Image (tube, helix red, strand yellow):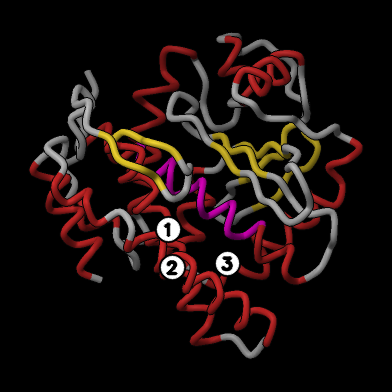
């Protein structure tokens, strides 16, 4: 029987305790991987989707992320292609992933590592990364699935420049925060998922249930924190301009979901969490 750790929802707010992602990862690993006989060393998205730990593990690139941990960029497979088609994602070919792999490595080593809290989350929770195609080079796609505990799907620009590195860094943090909040909710529900309450999402540009709105709000709250830290510390003009621009955009989006405060779908812990999100 899994004993969930007692967690305070306010602990999710940055700068969160650096050990939080590790606590959540251990809880998620026991809860979600045990029945598939997978560990961090044997996990792959392909194996998780197929339910077979004997599937071959095709890796395009392995990136060390400290403390003996590694992030693997996983190659395509028939199972992954089918999954992506079902979720309106277009998996990039292995050959087309070369620039993206370099951008992921640069985003980790040049941007995310500068922020220990975010680095802890990405290194602990993002085990597998898949490169997908965006509609055009100025549009970013990122995706994670609550049913797949430690995998993310992101697009990457075709250009290998500083703005591209920053965009990929945002995508990695974005999806790591979705994974973190999903694992937290296993231990401490924030939303009554039986509720039919919904509202318009500025991120999805469609009606979304309360849980989807709360996830979006949390993710962009963390991203705004990240860009603020960068804007206050960087000596790079490109970084500064990009960070300030993203903060303005995120502020507008966050302000448009204040009605979530009135949602009957929030649990007591969810209300506490939301009040603290909007208080910052």
Q: Mark on residue 46? A: none
Seen at 16% across and 59% down, the residue is 275
Check the image and name the residue furthest to the left: 268
Check the image and name the residue furthest to the bottom: 235
How far across and how far down the image is residue 213, in percent?
A: 33, 44
**Residue behind mark 1:** 220
Image quadrant for the N terminus? top left
Circle nearer the viewer, 3 or 1: 1
Seen at 59% across and 49% down, the residue is 68
Seen at 41% across and 60% down, the residue is 253
The mark tally for this picture is 3
How far across and how far down the image is residue 88, in percent?
A: 64, 26
**Residue behind mark 2:** 224
Circle nearer the viewer, 3 or 2: 2
User: Could you tell me if the residues under marks 1 and 2 are in contact, i.e. CB atoms within 8 Å?
Assistant: yes
Question: For residue 172: magenta?
Answer: yes
């Amino acid at each position: 029987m899994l004993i969930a750790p007692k967690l305070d929802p306010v602990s999710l707010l940055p700068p969160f305790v650096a050990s939080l992602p590790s606590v959540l990862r251990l809880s998620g690993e026991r809860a979600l991987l045990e029945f598939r006989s997978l560990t961090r060393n044997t996990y792959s998205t392909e194996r998780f989707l197929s339910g077979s730990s004997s599937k071959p593990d095709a890796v395009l690139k392995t990136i060390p992320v400290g403390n003996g941990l590694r992030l693997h960029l996983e190659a395509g497979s028939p199972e992954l292609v089918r999954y992506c088609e079902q979720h309106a994602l277009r998996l990039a070919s292995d050959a087309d992933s070369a620039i993206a792999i370099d951008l992921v490595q640069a985003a980790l080593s040049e941007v995310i590592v500068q922020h220990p809290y975010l680095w802890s989350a990405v290194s602990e929770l993002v085990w597998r990364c898949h490169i997908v195609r965006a509609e055009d080079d100025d549009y970013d796609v990122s995706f994670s699935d609550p049913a797949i505990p430690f995998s993310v799907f992101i697009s990457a620009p075709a250009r290998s420049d500083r703005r591209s590195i920053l965009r990929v860094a945002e995508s990695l943090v974005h999806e790591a925060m979705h994974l973190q909040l999903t694992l937290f909710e296993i231990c401490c529900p924030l939303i009554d998922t039986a509720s039919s309450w919904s509202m318009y999402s500025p991120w999805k540009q469609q009606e979304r249930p309360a849980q989807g709105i709360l996830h979006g709000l949390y993710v962009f709250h963390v991203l705004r924190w990240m860009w603020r830290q960068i804007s206050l510390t960087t000596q790079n003009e490109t970084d500064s301009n990009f960070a300030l621009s993203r903060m303005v955009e995120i502020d507008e989006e966050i302000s448009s979901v204040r009605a979530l405060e009135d949602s009957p779908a929030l649990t007591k812990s969810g209300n506490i969490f939301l009040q603290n999100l909007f208080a910052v």
